Image (tube, grey):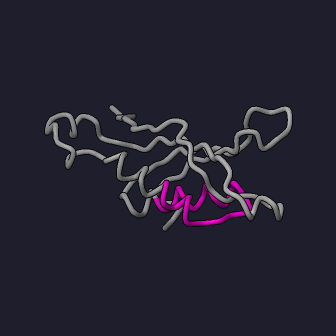
Amino acid sequence: MIKKDRIYVEDLRVKGTIGIFDWEKKIKQEISLSYEIDHDNLSASKEDKIEATTNYKTITKKIISFIEENKFELVETFAEKIAEMVIKDFDVNWIKLRVSKPGALRFSKDVGVIIERTSKDYE
């Protein structure tokens, strides 16, 4: 049987610098981020200790710092860099990541990208 356990964080809102226009490069805009990562829930549940699981708080804090400390023109680049960081720094095998800029497109609630990557993509 294939396990399909996931940890997820939905609609993390962080201020960051991302955009192609000069005015966007000078301000921080709201960025929405959601992610799912592979996770062995069965093993973690047997020990019932934070050390036995993938600590989503630690991952999320690193993502927030990354967003606050970096600038990108494209949402696409931004998403790739976050996915790569999570996979490499936290020994994650798979991530599904959604990054968007709410209100960036007139008449639209949201616009962004959704990517899925595995550790093999960053070897």
In-image side of 95 versus 33 (left or right): left
Q: Position of residue 32 (x, y in %)?
A: 60, 43
| Residue projecting furthest to the front | 27
Q: x, y (%) of residue 34? A: 54, 41
Q: Nearer the viewer, residue 116 or 26?
A: 26
Residue 117's x, y, as percent?
54, 52
Callout count: 0
Residue 22 sits in quarter = bottom right
- Residue ID at (57%, 62%): 81
Of all residues shown, which one is farthest toward the left?
47
Q: Give the percent coordinates (x, y) of residue 114.
A: 64, 44
Q: Which residues are magenta?
A: 64-85
Instruction: Please determine whether, in this image, residue 51 is positioned above or below residue 103.
Output: below
Q: Is residue 78 magenta?
A: yes
Q: Is residue 93 magenta?
A: no
Which image quarter holds the N terminus? Answer: top left
* Residue drawn at point x = 16 percent, y = 37 percent: 48
Q: In this picture, is 94 found above or below 121?
A: above
| Dominant SS in magenta | helix
79, above or below 43, in the image: below
Q: Residue 5: which quarter of the image?
A: top left
Q: Is residue 53 left or right of residue 118?
A: left
Q: Name the residue at the right extreme.
A: 106
The residue positioned 71% from the left and 59% from the top of the image is 27
Image-based side of 108 in relation to 89, left or right: right
